[in-house]
Image: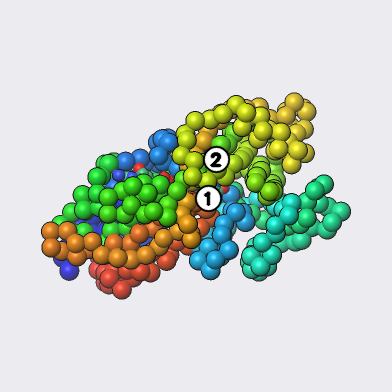
Amino acid sequence: MASWKAKDSIVILGAGIIGLDVALVLVRKGLGPLITVVAEYLPGDTAPDYTSPWAGCNYSSISGSDANALRWDRLGYRHLLQLATQCSAESFVARTASTEIWDDVVPNDKIKIMSEYLENFSVMTPEQLPQGAAFGVTFNTITLHAPKHLQWLYTTLQAAGVTFVRRSVTDLPSAVSPDTKILFNCIGNAAMSFPGVKDAKCYPTRGQVLLVRAPGVKRNMMRYGNGYITYVIPRPLSNDQVILGGYLQKNVGDHATYDHETKDILKRTTALSTELASSNNGQGPEILGVASGLRPSREGGARVERTELVVGGKAIALVHNYGAGGTGYQAGYGMALDAVRKIEQMLPTQELTASL
Ligand SMILES: Cc1cc2nc3c(=O)[nH]c(=O)nc-3n(C[C@H](O)[C@H](O)[C@H](O)COP(=O)(O)OP(=O)(O)OC[C@H]3O[C@@H](n4cnc5c(N)ncnc54)[C@H](O)[C@@H]3O)c2cc1C
């Protein structure tokens, strides 16, 4: 019982959105002083192997249609809507009008479920659809300024007693100490090759994005077509910055950016958004930066699963939580709720929590 006093009683390996959302769920249970986050990269860093700062970032229909994905989307939307309502300026999360359009394959069953909880949901009439489109919806989505949201989580979690340690570890046992009872594995793309994990279902999905300045772009726009995805995401609280994309290149782990992709993104996004095309007095968007990121994808969807890790003869509860693909922000909080539920009965009593 005494060892629940240790600051690394619970270790979270990884400080991307997935690890930070797990820490947030635990902090809301009063457990901050028992948590240490161990990671090579922390909020504020940029690195090819750290996906979270590169996200667009919004809630959209890009996620899978299986029961887990649908549940995580719903829980994530509720969580982010709460932040947008209660602390938008601090958390860099905003409620934003959105249009999503499909050229052909429409995920009808999924849209029906989403329509049950999305704010201001409406199906577009054929007259409202652009040329070549088969279906479209409008609703209130959530947009995030991804790097600033990570920073907000970082300071919020530290204020709640969470310890952060910058460290690259070579295997799962080296992430923990003799006091550790629970380890959350939130290592993103590293799950492909990390000793003790080596998940053959994992693969990267590359995307190139443009960061532009485009005053007047207030609406989030997504278009899904045969072999392409195009999006225009106004970045909240950013002085008119907008993220333009994109690509979903399965199994491509290339960090480079390409001029021909930049030109293609500009062509597709200005065709999709009249606000974007007419920004800067009709000159169109001013390019501030070009980047590429690797979504940590997984066949069959993300893995949220409890197993066991034996270190020095002692059993530690190990909860895997990775493979969020293109949905770490919209699904991360729901995944974190599931991950914490896996070890809920192990957590210290309310009495002990109150004394922390
Ligand atoms: C172009 C693009 C656009 C996107 N748009 C959206 C969007 O609009 N909405 C949305 O919800 N999602 C979006 N995503 C997806 C989202 O960014 C990812 O799902 C999410 O960032 C994955 O987070 P993660 O925590 O799993 O991984 P990461 O952010 O990569 O974090 C992994 C962590 O593990 C640590 N780590 C790994 N190996 C080790 C080791 N050996 N030792 C110590 N630490 C280690 C790393 O240092 C890091 O801290 C987008 C992604 C891209 C690339």
Residue under numbered circle 2: 207
- Residue drawn at x 76%, y 38% is 271
Query: Does residue 188 appear anywhere in the picture?
Result: yes
Residue 54, x across and y down, in percent: 50, 40
Residue under numbered circle 1: 326
Mark 2 beta carbon near ligand 1 (under 8 Å)? yes
- Asked whether, in this view, residue 101 is left or right of residue 127, the answer is left
Residue 98, x across and y down, in percent: 69, 51
Quarter of the view holding residue 125: bottom right
On residue 253, the disc is none
- Asked whether, in this view, residue 273 is left or right of residue 204, the answer is right
Category of crowding for the residue at label 2, using alpha-carbon neighbours closer than 10 angstroms: few (below 14), some (14–19), many (at least 20)? many
Q: Is residue 167 above or below residue 283?
A: below
Identify the mark nearer the N-term, 1 or 2: 2
Residue 153, x across and y down, in percent: 42, 49
- Asked whether, in this view, residue 304 is left or right of residue 235, the answer is left
Mark 1 beta carbon near ligand 1 (under 8 Å)? yes
- Residue drawn at x 53%, y 30% is 257
- Residue drawn at x 53%, y 33% is 291
- Name the image quarter holding the N terminus: bottom left
Which residue type carries mark 1? Gly
Quarter of the view holding residue 3: bottom left
Q: Is residue 268 above or below residue 152?
A: above
- Residue drawn at x 45%, y 61% is 335
For the residues labelled 1 and 2, say whether their Cβ atoms are less than 8 Å apart: yes
- Name the image quarter holding the C terminus: bottom left
Which residue type carries mark 2? Gly
